[in-house]
Image (cartoon, rainbow, N blue to C red):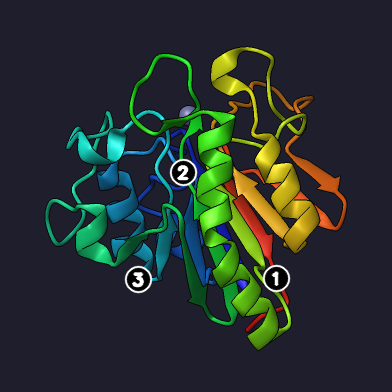
Amino acid sequence: MRILCVSDQIDPLVYSPRMRERFRDVDLVLAAGDLPGEYLGFITSMLNRPLLYVSGNHDLLRSGSRPPFWIEPAEGPARAEDHGATGLDFKLAREGGLIVLGLPGSMVYNRGPNQFTELSMALRIAALVPRLLWNRLLRGRAVDLVLTHAPPRGVHDRDDPCHRGFRSFLWLMRAFKPRWLVHGHVHLYDLSDVRVSEVGGTTVVNAFGHWILETEEN
Ligand SMILES: [Zn+2]
């Protein structure tokens, strides 16, 4: 399975009339937050593939604002939800044999939308534990891929309150051993910034801009 991950920034390689040929072998799209709904709608209408997204702390999905230099898709204005994009905030989904869990938002810093304290994030993850255990019982694994906006604490995160990662994501990775955790929120400014890290048995990827992930699932 070939997965196009996008996050935080409208990537000119994705937001391009040539994106259909560039990404035609992609099976699934994951959006890790802080992107306008119209951009996600553009991706789904160009690729005609399932797209799962989590909300970021910049609530662009509901703003209705268009990205600069907007190219109108062939079938007219697009909203993410109108084109098969599926919100995954605190939800589990299965796509092509892959179990995906979505965790939105960032650490609280100014009481804006989609901001959580460490405790409120931990409680929301705890509420998902019965379903994760059920998956493990039924399918032999709780979750394959965790899609978040914020990073785990100490992995690709920063020291300021807004960009600090969640400790509860570290617990989640230790307890349920997902193969991937894909996040956004932390902008990458040059090639020396780390994009991919191994944490326990989990590969943590910062999807900033775009990133292609290959899995063994069909
Ligand atoms: Zn963010």
Element under disc 1: loop
Q: Is residue 209 visible?
A: no
**Residue at 67% over, 52% down:** 181
Residue under label 2, please give it. Answer: 104
Residue carrying label 3: 48
Q: Amino acid at mark 3?
A: Asn
Q: For the residue marked with disc 2, what is the amino acid? A: Pro
Q: Amino acid at mark 1?
A: Thr
Residue behind label 1 places its C-beta within 8 angstroms of ligand 1: no
Residue 50 in the image: x percent, y percent? 40, 69
Classify mark 2: helix, strand or loop: loop
Q: Quadrant of the C terminus?
A: bottom right
Above/below status of 91 relative to 160: below
- Write the residue at 17% across / 37% down: 64
Where is residue 35? Give x, y as percent: 37, 38
* Of the image marks 2 and 1, the number of the one nearer the N terminus: 2
What is the spatial separation of the Cα atoms under label 3 and label 1, in whole angstroms?
A: 20 Å
Q: Position of 182 compared to 216: left or right?
A: left
Numbered badge on residue 192: none
